[in-house]
Amino acid sequence: MSSSLTINSTLELRTGAKLPILGFGVWDSPQDLTVKSCLEALKVGYRHIDTAQGYSNEAEVGEAVKQSGLARKDIYITSKIWEAGDDVDLTYERCLGSVKKIAGEDGYLDLMLIHNAAVGAEPRKKMWLAMEKLHSEGRFKSIGVSNYGIGHIEDMKSYAKVWPPAVNQLELHPWLQQREVVEYCHKNGIVVEAYCPIVRNQKANDPTLNEIAKKHGKTSVQVLVRYCIDKGWSPLPKSDNPGRIAQNADVFDFQLGKDDMEKLDGMPQEKALVLAVDNESTK
């Protein structure tokens, strides 16, 4: 990745839409803090907010967008559906609920994802068909998936009119690189987003990470965010602390060298903090 990247840089989705290279995650952000945190993120330059039905803070994200004073077209908003309804129509209504909560009756979302492949093949199909309908109506500008293995994405070919998905959002960091599914996504034009890029701060004392951070005059967290960017992924760091929100975005004045990347790429691979992705399963 070029060192000329800035916080305004984007990755192009297969729909032609531009996904900001850095996103702001609001997982586990309490409702009373979500508006404040999102406003802080937008103030320091983030232009992508990633929420989900399962986070119970979609309305607060929408409120922050309203209060920000920024034009809706200048903020990229993602949400995710966790559970299908009993049929495609009810699932469609469930998806539309996210649009209304965040962007109002006539609004749209830039990206909607199926949150988790582990819900099973039939619910995944219902969700995708409902999302395709909303995509065709312009209520979802792009549609994608999260926590999908190769088998899950391949299985979509049997029913999807829109394939491949625009995005696959995965837990990604040096200790969980998910190389097989990432390579598959890159080969198929699926943009990869990285959640938990800072490993929930569990690796703050790692000596190799700290050595690289010291070399660049950066924090270990900033190195982890930049690692994702230099891998061609779009990281979604999360914080409710104003100082850390700004710090996590301050990653565009340095670039990791080849030796830095090799050291981080060589980290032992560990278990997922959130969800293990099964690349073979279509269940």
Image (cartoon, rainbow, N blue to C red):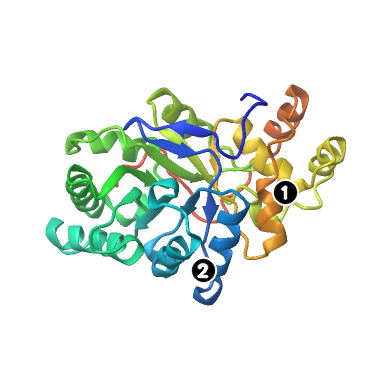
Image point (82%, 37%), residue name: 212
- 55 to the left or right of 165: right
The disc, 1 or 2, on the residue closer to the chain's N-terminal end is 2
Using the numbered discs, state the Cα–Cα distance from disc 1 to disc 2 in whole angstroms.
Answer: 23 Å
Is 3 situated above or below 221?
above
Mark 2: few/some/many CA within 10 Å (<14, 14-19, 20+): many
Is 265 situated above or below 103?
above
- 54 to the left or right of 9: left
Q: Which mark is residue 221?
A: 1
Occupied quadrant, residue 213? top right
Where does residue 76 sit, x and y in percent of width and height? 43, 48
Mark 1: few/some/many CA within 10 Å (<14, 14-19, 20+): many
Secondary structure found at label 1: helix
Image point (72%, 48%), residue name: 221
What type is the residue that disc 1 sits on? Answer: Val
Where does residue 114 sit, x and y in percent of width and height? 33, 51
Where does residue 19 sit, x and y in percent of width and height? 45, 39
Image point (38%, 55%), residue name: 79
Q: Nearer the viewer, residue 48 or 91?
A: 48
- Per the image, the residue denoted by label 2 is 35
Task: Indicate the quadrant containing the N terminus: top left, top right, bottom left or bottom right.
Answer: top right
Secondary structure found at label 2: helix
Tell me, yes or no, whether the two marked residues, 1 and 2, touch with CB atoms within 8 Å. Answer: no
